[in-house]
Amino acid sequence: MTLPEPIDRFFRADFTAFDADAILQDEGATHRGPSEILAWWREAEASYQHTVTPESLDGTTVTAKVSGNFPGSPARIRFAFTLKNDRIAALEIG
């Protein structure tokens, strides 16, 4: 499976893929801009010690297997991306 370049960068934890005004929504919280999004990722990584493996792509929505230190692991989670000018403008996880 070939992911669009900014989406591939996200799954490689390259947060330069996010637009300066990007919005990420996860578990009822909204994170704005690359620095808040990176802080969210680091906190999740420390808490859950997770791995994310993309499994399918439908347009700009990826279903991924997420495994880690959380109840129900592994879980299949949907990542719905909005792209703008080769950057991630928005991401809704759920």
Image: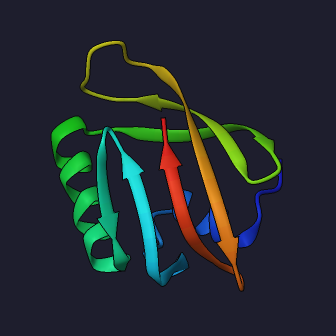
Image coords of residue 10 (percent x, y) = 53, 63
Q: How is the image coloured?
A: rainbow
Residue 73 is situated, as x and y percent measured from the top left of the image, at 38, 18
In this picture, is 82 found above or below 61?
Answer: below
**Residue for point 65% across, 63% down:** 82
Q: Is residue 94 above or below residue 90?
A: above
Residue at the spot 56% in from the left edge and 73% down from the top edge:
89
Residue 35 lies in what quarter of the image?
Answer: bottom left
Relative to residue 41, is residue 83 drawn left or right?
right
What residue is shown at x 23% (from left), y 36% (from top)? 48
- 34 relative position to 45: left or right: right
Considering depth in this image, is 8 or 21 the residue closer to the camera?
Answer: 21
Q: Is residue 3 above or below residue 23?
A: above
Between 17 and 23, the residue placed more toward the observer is: 23
- Judging depth in this view, the residue of 54 and 91 nearest the camera is 91
73 shown above or below 20: above
Q: Is residue 52 left or right of residue 56?
A: left
Image position of 60 (left or right of 51) = right
